[in-house]
Image (cartoon, rainbow, N blue to C red):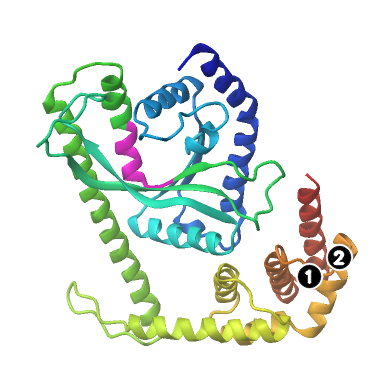
Amino acid sequence: MKKHQREAILISFLNKKEKYKKLAEYIVQLIQDDPSSPKESLHTITYRIKDEFILIEKINRLNKELEAGLPPIMEENYQERVGDLLGVRIICLRLSDVEKVEAYLKLLSEENILSFVKGPDQKRSFILPVNPGDSIPDGIDLRYSGYSSIHYQIELGENSDAPSGLQGLLFELQLRTILEEAWSEIDHKYRYVRSRIGVNLPEHIHTGFYNLSAYLQVAALQAESLCRLAETYGLKKIAKVKGIARTPLGDEFSSIDLGKDEASRKLSSSEIEKSLKRVLGFKVTPRTLIYIEKRLGDVNSEEKPHKTLQKLLSKNRLLEFKTIFQEILNIEPFANTKEKNIDVINALNFGIFYEHQGKRVAQEGLRAVLRWRKDRSIC
């Protein structure tokens, strides 16, 4: 790459860094503040914006590897061709947590809040028996640990409520367990960086990092197994209190009909969805339904959830909710397609506060939430 081309890319990227920072903050806030995000499955959300010199290094490498007929990466197209100018990383404690976050991201995609440009792809941690940058000879067996993280290339969807100017910016999202993160950090600092600057590490060190990855994969599987055993004890105790489980024999658990429990949950979900549609006149998104199910279970685990819902969203309470909503936001609730599901969540929480904290607390709590929404939309 010629000097003037490199300088043009660097100046352009430096001027756009603030936008990528705003995008990162929006994505982190979206996931952390979303009432229906699987917060119990999130350990850490971090982000990084690509270093300028690493960016130039990557563009030079990608230009050398270009397929015939493709234009080189220049100032005009680097944002579209380099998909990880911003990287967001979600770290989970358990393998099953990763699956829950994947399902949540899929819901965001289905609602067109996020748009998947590429992926999800499962990235393997390759350990090559050649120096980085060298061509790979024929017949070389590429060994990998099987331990992986999930990568997406994403941009904001049409239904995103992000600040203006962020549409069309690509970012990479990585989803991994905390043990994979540990291996990646150690490998990057002590093997990858040294190999990248030309340090010729002996084969037994490469193999050692490969083995460490395999050990951590086994540890992740063991951690998942232990967590499930601990959860089973919790289920066992709940079931025993409710009188639906037999006494365990030795170290074995008596059976709990989890299949029946899942069928019951699906039936309950369907009844909640029907009740909401009768009360509100429209169908809520799956993401909102998940949140409402959780909240109703917290409010009254003994009563059928759809019955609790009918109390919380009674005609009189909905009328009070609409009055305060119009007072603060000067618009009708449930009218804006992009925001009607958050209106539903506000209405439900108003009903819960009304039920448990009384009328005045519910009204002032709703006003505070709606003022926050108003201030956020102005920003």
Instruction: Indicate left or right for 280 with 134 as reference.
Output: right
Q: Position of residue 42 (x, y in %)?
A: 47, 52
Q: Position of residue 205 (x, y in %)?
A: 16, 26
Element type where label 1 sits in the image: loop
Identified at 52% across, 31% down, the residue is 78
Residue 372 in sight here? yes
As drawn, which residue projects farthest toward the front?
69
Q: Is residue 204 magenta?
A: no
User: How much space separates mark 1 and mark 2, taking CA atoms?
Assistant: 8 Å
Residue 302 in sight here? no
Per the image, the residue denoted by label 1 is: 335
Per the image, the residue denoted by label 2 is: 331
As drawn, which residue projects farthest toward the left?
139
**The quadrant where residue 212 appears:** top left
Identified at 87% across, 72% down, the residue is 323
Q: Which residues are magenta?
A: 174-185
Which amino acid does the dot numbered 1 rest on? Ala
Identified at 82% across, 61% down, the residue is 367
Circles 1 and 2: CB distance less than 8 Å?
A: yes
